[in-house]
Image (spheres, coloured by chain):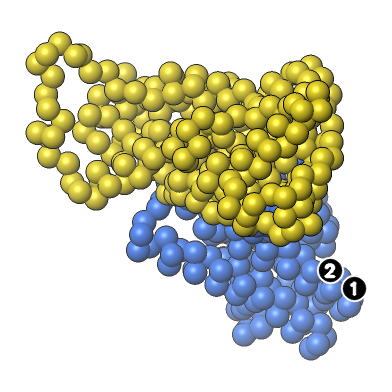
Amino acid sequence: MNLTLKIWRQKNANDKGKMVSYNVTDISEHMSFLEMLDVLNEELVAKGEEPVAFDHDCREGICGMCSLHINGEAHGPDRGITTCQLHMRMFKDGDTIHIEPFRAKAFPVIKDLIVDRSAFDRIQQAGGYISVNTSGNTQDANAIPIPKADADLSMDAATCIGCGACVASCKNASAMLFVSAKVSQYALLPQGQVEAKDRVLNMVNQMDKEGFGNCTNTGACEVECPKNISISNIARMNREYLSASMKDD
Amino acid sequence: MAKGMTSVTRKILMALSGFFLLVFLLQHCAINFLSVISPDTFNEVSHFMGTNPLIQFLLQPVLAFGLVFHLAMGIVLELQNRDARPVKYAVNKPGENASWVSRNMIITGIMIFLFLLLHSADFWFPELKVKYIDGDMTGMTAEGHFRYYEELQHQFHNPIRVGLYALSFVFLSLHLMHGFQSAFQSVGFQHNKYTPIIKKLGTIYAIVIPAAFVFIALYHFINA
C-alpha cells in the first residue's frame, strides 16, 4: 500500500518543530508500524536526509519503550497493544497517517518522536518498590498465603509497562493510571504493607512535582492502555491515599 | 486554595463538594415538586426553609460555600490541566476513548453557574432583600396569604425565562451524567457489583432530577 505520512520533526528539545509530509510506497499490510517507519528511515538515509527518531526496543509489546500518537490516539487505532504490535493492515491504501510524539509538559520532546519519560522513573524511585534484605534468610514469597483474587489483581496492575499512553491519551495529561498501577501492585500484597503509607504519599507527591495534570475520571487512559490497566486501580490509590493521610507516623 | 494540596486531595474534595450538591439538588427538587402537588404545602415548607435559623444561618452559608468551592476548584483544575499539556496534538480523537460529557465538565459547569446567577437574581437575592433588608419575615402578601407560590408562578410567566431554565437543566443533566458516578470513583469507591449499579443510578438521577425541574417550570408556565 502507498501512504502519506505526516510526522512531527523536531531537531532537539529547544527546536520549535513542525509536521513534515513523507510518501512511502509498497508497504506490506503484514508489516508492523515500526517496520513501516524503518522503511521510511532507510529511504531517508539513502537520500542523505536525517532519519526520523523514534523510541523502540523489544518490539513485542513488553518493554514499554515504543510510544507515538498515531492518527489522534496513543499507540494508534487498535486496542490493547503497543505501537510495535500495531500492524499496517489497520490502515488502507492511500491513507494519510499523522504521527506525533506523546504530548505532556512532563514528557518533553527530546528529538522528533522521542520524549523524555524519566518522570515515570522518578515516581517509581519515590516509592514504587519494597525493601527486602537479600541476606540469604529472606522468607520465600510463596510461603506467604495470599488470596488468589488479590494476587491476580496485583499481577494485572503489575503488567503496566510504563509506556505513558495513559498520560498521552488523558485530556489533562494525568499520570494517575500509571501511578495507581504501581501503588496497587504492592497495596494488594502483604509484602507491600510495610511501606504502604509512605509509598502512596511519596509517589503522588512526585507525580504532582513532575507537572502531570489532575485526573477527572474521563477513562480515556484505560481505553488506550496497551495492557488494559483498569481505572479501578485509581480508585484503590485514592483509598490508599485517604487512609495514608489519616494515619499518624 | 489548591496550592499545597496534592492532585488526589483536590480530586477527593471536588467529589465531596459534588456529593453535597447532589443532596441539595434532591431536596430542592422535592420541595419544588410540592408546588405541583399542593400549593399550600409548598408555601408552608418554603416559609419554614426561609425562616428557620438553622437552615438560614448554617445550611445556607454552607451551601453557598460548597457551590463556590466546587466552581473555583473546577476552574483551578481546568487551568492546571491545560498547563499540563502546553503543546496540543495536531490531530486528536478524544471521542474515541472518552465521552463528551466527561471531557467537558468545565463547559457544562460554567453554564450551570451562569444559570445560578440568573436563578439567584430571580429568587434568592429578592428573598434576601425582603427578609434581611426590608426586615419582613412574615412571608405574607399585603392580602394576608403566603407569597411563595405566587412568586413562583410569576417567574414562570415569561416563555424566555422558562426556555432558559429548560436549557440550563440540559447542561445540568450532562454535568450529572459524568459527575454522579465520577464522585464515587474519586473517593475510592469501586466495586464489581455496586459500581455498575451506581453508574445506572447516576444516569437515572441525571435524567429524572433535571427533567422534574423542567416539568415544574413548564407546569407553572402552562397553568399561569
Label 1 lies in what chain? B
Taking depth in this image into account, of B104 and A103 the one nearest to the observer is A103
Q: Which mark is residue A223?
A: none
Q: Amino acid at mark 2?
A: Leu
| Location of residue B124 in the rendering, given as x and y in whole percent from the top left corner | 76, 58
The tint chain A carries is yellow
Taking depth in this image into account, of A206 and B116 the one nearest to the observer is A206
Q: Residues within 10 Å of mark 2 (few under 14, many from 20)?
A: few
Asked if badges 1 and 2 are on one and the same chain, I answer yes
Residue with the mark numbered 1? B160
Tell me where residue B25 sits by quadrant. Answer: bottom right
| Location of residue A95 in the rendering, given as x and y in whole percent from the top left corner | 77, 55
The tint chain B carries is blue
Residue with the mark numbered 2? B164
Question: Outermost residue toward the top?
Answer: A135
Query: Residue at the spot x=38%, y=62% of the render?
Result: B194
Query: Residue at the spot x=18%, y=46% of the render?
Result: A147
Taking depth in this image into account, of A143 and A236 the one nearest to the observer is A143
**Cβ–Cβ under 8 Å for marks 1 and 2:** yes
| Location of residue A43 in the rendering, given as x and y in whole percent from the top left corner | 75, 33
Query: Residue at the spot x=61%, y=40% of the render?
Result: A35
